[in-house]
Image (tube, rainbow, N blue to C red):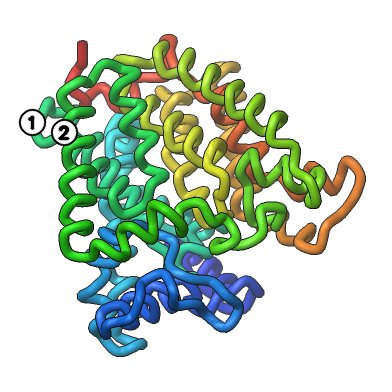
């Protein structure tokens, strides 16, 4: 009954609350790739408000089957793929915690699905028709392979990085943790996919790497409240002249914290992957609110670090932190400040998601007696 009531409440809330995005992003994918398939230039197609295709040409190749569909079937295909990818991610992330705690498998999975759907980044991913959850599924397929020492580990990260550049941060993670074979596999996969796209679409490839990649105006204003990256924070401090030196200092600090924490958690892929997803959100020049689905694994790590129950004092603090972080990410509080707001409350509210991400990067359990047991049953120890 709890799951049914929760699912009904979340479904009604999503249906009636503002924030529907009209499948805008899949509209960009659909329009640009159809234009390109019809003989036009991939990066010259723009919407009425001047938004165009921003991903590498390999992404356009991957999207060709969906672009061949009429509009409504294309939306349905995107939604179906997102649901399947979300199911895989929830099974992979929540399953070991469920087994550790002794919770009923399907009941917990259904409850986790409801909680996942309530998150603002997930709601926006679905209503924009975005590809975030699909890219996460590719990256986390490599987590599954790494835990089993599979020779194909790295292929998922490589494909995700060829579709969108941000997941390439996971190649850095593989290098930092000395997963040399997986790093080489990921790099080779990205290179092969990019060269394939270059062979099929040399003009589009040249345009992307010489023009579109460097034109941040194609994706929107850096100071818009939806940009919850460190550069977004700096841009909101001074929209006219963002302090790039301050941004570089903040990025450097984030990298140092990430490096120290990842090295401490080197034997635990799940913590390392969660920290790396958080880092990617922070250091990317543009991290729209829907990109923050990469914080979900960190929430699972926090909950897993409270086991076994009943929790002690430290575990209760972690559980409270997870609840607060989850509540903020569900709230949509940043949109209250979409038109700007001065003062401390404006800074805190307008950067609320970013502050959650920064807090998780610093405080996510990355070692000690309660950070790893939740998934030891499933994971294969790594050297």
Q: Which of 340 and 88 is in front in this view?
A: 340
- Tell me if residue 39 comes above or below residue 351 in the rendering: below
- Is disc 2 in contact with disc 1, using a CB cutoff of under 8 Å? yes
Determine crowd level at label 2: few under 14, some 14-19, many 20+ residues with C-alpha closer than 10 A: many
State the mark number for residue 185.
2
Q: Nearer the viewer, residue 336 or 156?
A: 156
The x, y position of residue 324, in whole percent, is 64, 40
- Tell me if residue 237 comes above or below residue 255 in the rendering: below
Counting labels gives 2
Residue 327 is left or right of residue 63, and the answer is right
Of circles 2 and 1, the one toward us is: 2
In the figure, residue 185 lies in which quadrant? top left
Residue located 60% across and 54% down the image = 330
Q: Which of 38 and 158 is in front in this view?
A: 38
Secondary element under disc 1, as helix, strand or loop, is: loop
Residue located 22% across and 35% down the image = 187
- Residue at which label 1 appears: 151
Residue located 54% across and 71% down the image = 51
Q: Can residue 110 be spotted in the picture?
A: no
Residue located 57% across and 44% down the image = 285
The x, y position of residue 240, in whole percent, is 80, 51
């Amino acid at each position: 009954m709890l799951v049914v009531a929760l699912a009904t409440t979340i479904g009604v809330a999503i249906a009636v609350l503002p924030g529907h995005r009209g499948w805008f992003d899949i509209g960009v994918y659909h329009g640009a790739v159809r234009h390109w398939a019809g003989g036009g230039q991939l990066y010259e197609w723009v919407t009425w408000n001047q938004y165009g295709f921003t991903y590498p040409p390999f992404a356009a190749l991957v999207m060709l089957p969906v672009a061949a569909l009429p509009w409504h079937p294309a939306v349905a295909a995107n939604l179906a793929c997102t649901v399947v990818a979300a199911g895989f991610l929830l099974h992979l992330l929540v399953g070991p915690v469920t087994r550790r705690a002794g919770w009923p498998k399907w009941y917990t999975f259904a409850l986790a699905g409801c909680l996942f759907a309530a998150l603002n980044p997930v709601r926006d991913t679905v209503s924009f028709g975005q590809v975030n959850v699909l890219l996460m599924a590719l990256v986390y397929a490599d987590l599954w392979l790494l835990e089993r020492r599979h020779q194909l580990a790295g292929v998922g990260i490589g494909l995700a990085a060829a579709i969108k550049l941000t997941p390439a941060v996971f190649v850095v993670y593989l290098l930092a943790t000395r997963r040399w074979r997986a790093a080489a596999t990921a790099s080779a996969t990205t290179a092969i996919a990019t060269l394939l796209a270059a062979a099929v679409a040399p003009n589009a490839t040249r345009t992307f790497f010489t023009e579109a990649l460097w034109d941040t105006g194609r994706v929107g204003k850096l100071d818009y409240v939806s940009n919850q990256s460190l550069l977004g924070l700096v841009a909101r401090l001074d929209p006219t002249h963002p302090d790039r030196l301050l941004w570089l200092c903040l990025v450097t600090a984030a990298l140092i914290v990430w490096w120290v924490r990842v090295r401490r958690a080197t034997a635990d892929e799940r913590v390392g992957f969660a920290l790396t997803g958080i880092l990617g959100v922070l250091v990317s020049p543009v991290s729209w609110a829907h990109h923050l689905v990469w914080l979900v694994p960190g929430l699972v790590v926090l909950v897993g670090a409270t086991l076994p129950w009943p929790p002690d004092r430290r575990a209760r603090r972690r559980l409270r932190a997870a609840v607060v972080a989850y509540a903020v990410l569900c709230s949509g509080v940043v949109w209250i400040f979409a038109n700007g707001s001065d003062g401390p409350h404006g800074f805190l509210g307008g950067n609320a998601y970013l502050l959650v991400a920064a807090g998780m990067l610093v405080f996510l359990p990355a070692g000690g007696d309660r950070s790893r047991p939740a998934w030891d049953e499933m994971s294969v120890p790594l050297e």
